[in-house]
Image: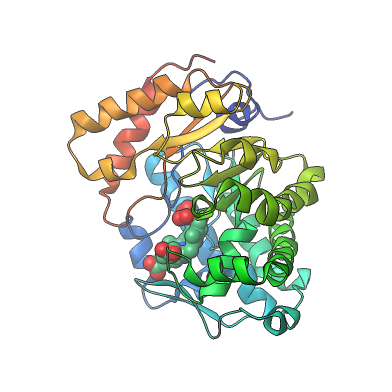
Amino acid sequence: MSQPTSPLLAAYRGQPVTRRPVWFMRQAGRSLPEYRALREGTSMLEACLTPELAAEITVQPVRRHDVDAGIFFSDIVVPLRLAGIGVEIVPGVGPVLDSPIRSAADVAALPELDPDALAPVRAGVAGAVAELGATPLIGFAGAPFTLASYLIEGRPNRDLPATKALLAEDPETFNRLLGWVAGITATFLRAQVEAGAVALQLFDSWVGRLSPAEYRINVQPHSAAVFAAIADLGVPRVHFGTATANLLPDLLAAGADVIGVASDLGLDQANQLLGGAVPLQGNLDPALLSGDWATLEAATRDVVARGAAAPGHVFNLGHGVPPDTNPDVLTRLVELVHSIPPEH
Ligand code: 1CP
């Protein structure tokens, strides 16, 4: 017997839902005491590449909060590490490379990603899917621009000075680098679906740093290549970025099925910019999670009301869960979202 369509997949496809689906970007992680206990003594990338750990950490927030999806516990730099690039995730900092990739010679020397190297990812996804039962698992990757910005900068720097300089001074090398990232990204996403993920999200977190012209000419073709390379898998493809008010139709044109919206734009405005034809995901301001409940509840109802015009709405935050979030607030937020009757 075939399973009934989950609320998540129904909303991603613009179909009616039995309840309004909700999950949170970065729902696994430091806000959960059970995560902190499990991670004790294990580095971030080691945890990502140990299938039993990655599977268990993926399931923890689903068990605790009753969210409508798991998102595979991994990181956007995992495919870089598996391709053989020297990268570590430094606690409190983020991804740090042994040496940044900035020259034509650096880019020419980049290794291939052997699909067999993804065995720990496949095993982790399969383990999570088995444990999740009827709850769908979302796979993900970093988009070419965001991932390339970490390669170019060498460590987190939200102003992206070296990335902007390479784009302006040597667009050919910049484009070669994004082309390489697009290839490993498609391989990473494909492995997750083959192992059981039923939806995919491409995080272009820092794309809002670009002008529409920079995006269209030098970035969008590489994101489009990723979406095209996974189109045959038939799973909904979500595209998320922050500060994207100027870029929303261009992000959609890269080939996504669903647009994830950050908190800098109302879902009603996003829906208008996208011609009213695209399911949306988002976009409660994560900063409100540490404030008083009445404000959070009002803001949540406002997000739901604004999202109602879109052909489908999956409730989420506008960006990731802050590490100091009280997990009980997230559980209560899920209950609230589920208690508001869906209109679609
Ligand atoms: O959402 C989930 O629960 C799954 C886990 C997940 C995801 C989707 C992690 C675990 N990382 C990511 C994606 C990711 N990684 C993105 C895109 C999403 C976003 O914009 O937040 C980005 C930009 C990264 C890069 C990264 N990895 C950062 C940001 C650094 C910066 O530039 O400010 C950080 C801090 C990491 C480490 C990391 N990744 C994940 C976790 C739980 C952590 C913290 C590790 C630790 O505390 O030891």
Whether residue 5 is visible to the viewer of this picture, yes or no, is yes
Whole-percent x and y of residue 83?
69, 76
Is residue 166 found left or right of 291 in the rendered image?
right
Q: Horizontal placement of 225 versus 61: left or right?
A: right
| Side of 181 relative to 290 (left or right) | right
> Which residue appears farthest toward the front when viewing the image?
169
Q: Residue at x 64, y 38 (%)?
A: 252
- The answer to whether 202 is drawn above or below residue 10 in the figure is below
Front position in the image: 17 or 202: 202
Q: Nearer the viewer, residue 35 or 249?
A: 249
Q: What residue do we see at 54% from left, 59% from top? A: 55
In the image shown, does 14 or 35 lie closer to the viewer?
14
Q: Is residue 195 visible?
A: no
The C terminus, quarter of image? top right
Looking at the image, is 72 positioned above or below residue 20?
A: below
- The image shows residue 259, relative to residue 16, as above or below, that is below
Please report the residue visible at 51 percent of the width from the left and 29 percent of the height from the top. Answer: 270
Residue 250 x, y percent position in the rendering: 64, 40
